[in-house]
Amino acid sequence: MTSPAMHASFAPLPDPVANDPRLVRLYLKQTLLRFCGGLCLLPMAIVAAGMVMLIRYPPIGDGRHWWQLTLPVLPGLLAPLLGVNGMVRQQLRAFADEGVVLTEELISARVTRELTSPFDIFTTFDLCAEALSGLATGQALGLAGPPAFAHDPFDRIILLGRARPFRLFGATEVRLFVAPGEGVHGVRIRVRRIVSGDFLAMQKGGALRAVEAVTAQLQAGLARRREALYARARGQAAERAALQAKLLALQAQVEPHFLFNTLANLKYLMRTEPAAALTMLDHLTDYLHSALPDLRAVSSTVGRELDLAQAYLSIMQIRMGKRLRFAIEASDTVRALPMPPAMLISLLENAVKHGLEGWPHPGTVRIEACLEEGMLALRVQDDGAGFGGSAAQGAGLGLSNIHTRLALLYGGAASLAVAEGEAGGVSACLHLPLAMPAARAGA
């Protein structure tokens, strides 16, 4: 984030602007040293050459020495140094007219800012390159078009400035690194001015302005990406909520229709066979204990669904007597696997209602849960009337409901196959991935 010092550097101040005398002296000394380092290189070279000539060579023909030839040149070369004080005072007045207070960063050629990115280093580098290579960054730097731009994705370095070569005309460096001990997402972005030819020029706040402009562009780019991700997450959350509501509505449709018939049978048995009525009531209690929570849940387990199936078949066995037998097979490992609720009971109701309830002969329902080729396989088989006694292959509210829920939850990763059994009747096989889809199930 932008530090208070960044804002204070260019913040408008009440007139007149009172600069710290220490900073004024520092500005004068820095400017003098820069001019000495830049403008005095040539006269220093001439003086050195003259001294070499004086030592190594005799006087020239008219009796004069080489060093005497350099003396008329020195005043003209040293004249700009005498005007440094006036130049500094003039720039201070320009700062005052702009309402800018003098700071060490304002007159420095080396300014640094550091940001923290919430993204990984690869995403952050791509984001920085995208944010800094466009026209908006050039305009922020006071250019007519996009800045001169170079980037190294291996060292995670970006350079941008007015023109190339950067070491001559100056550039701002953006370097990415991972802070020690902060993990993959502890990405830092360091923005700084590199040492270049403008180091020897009088500093008028250009380095600070360039670093702050680049920092602002990076902050805006990070904020845009973060907001886009938040909007996407909000959209996904809304989608999950709508999907969950739709799934709950579909699950509510498979609430057992046999309850009214069971209660009617229970009333009859209480008058004729109290012991059988008590047994049915126990099984009905077990059934409701397993079924009712599932009608409001998004995920269940194979074990819970098998317990629900056993309670349902026990009730139907009392109603149908010896015409119904059943068997359930599943290992403890398989029983612990997750699965959507109320799907197995829909297959089971379909088998009993269409295969055995109207069948005049004794019949058996077999439920098997196992692992097949890395998927959970659930089979419900009956040896009853077959397709001749069912509504239609794969049709009906229960099977249509399962197909819809599988598509919503798993896309194409799950399947339901209904076929004629080898020994008659119908075999329904449900293949599911071993894990519930968290993004779709809202887990």
Image (cartoon, grey):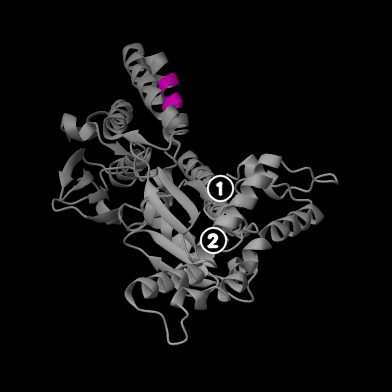
Q: Which residue is mark 2?
A: 36
Q: Give left or right: position of 358 versus 26.
A: left
Q: Which residue is mark 1?
A: 234
Secondary structure category for the residue under label 2 = helix
- Three-letter code for the amino acid on which mark 1 is drawn: Arg
Mark positioned earlier in the residue sequence (1 or 2): 2
- Image location (x, y in percent) of residue 266: 41, 21
State the residue at coordinates (49%, 72%).
42
CB-based contact (under 8 Å), mark 1 and mark 2: no
Secondary structure category for the residue under label 1 = helix
Looking at the image, residue 88 lies above or below residue 245: below
Could you tell me which quadrant the C terminus lies in? top left
Query: Magenta segment range?
Result: 262-267
Residue nearer the viewer, 172 or 91: 91
Residue 83 is covered by the magenta coloring? no
Looking at the image, residue 35 lies above or below residue 404: below
Tell me, yes or no, if residue 177 can be seen here: yes
Extreme residue in the front direction = 63
Residue nearer the viewer, 307 or 327: 307
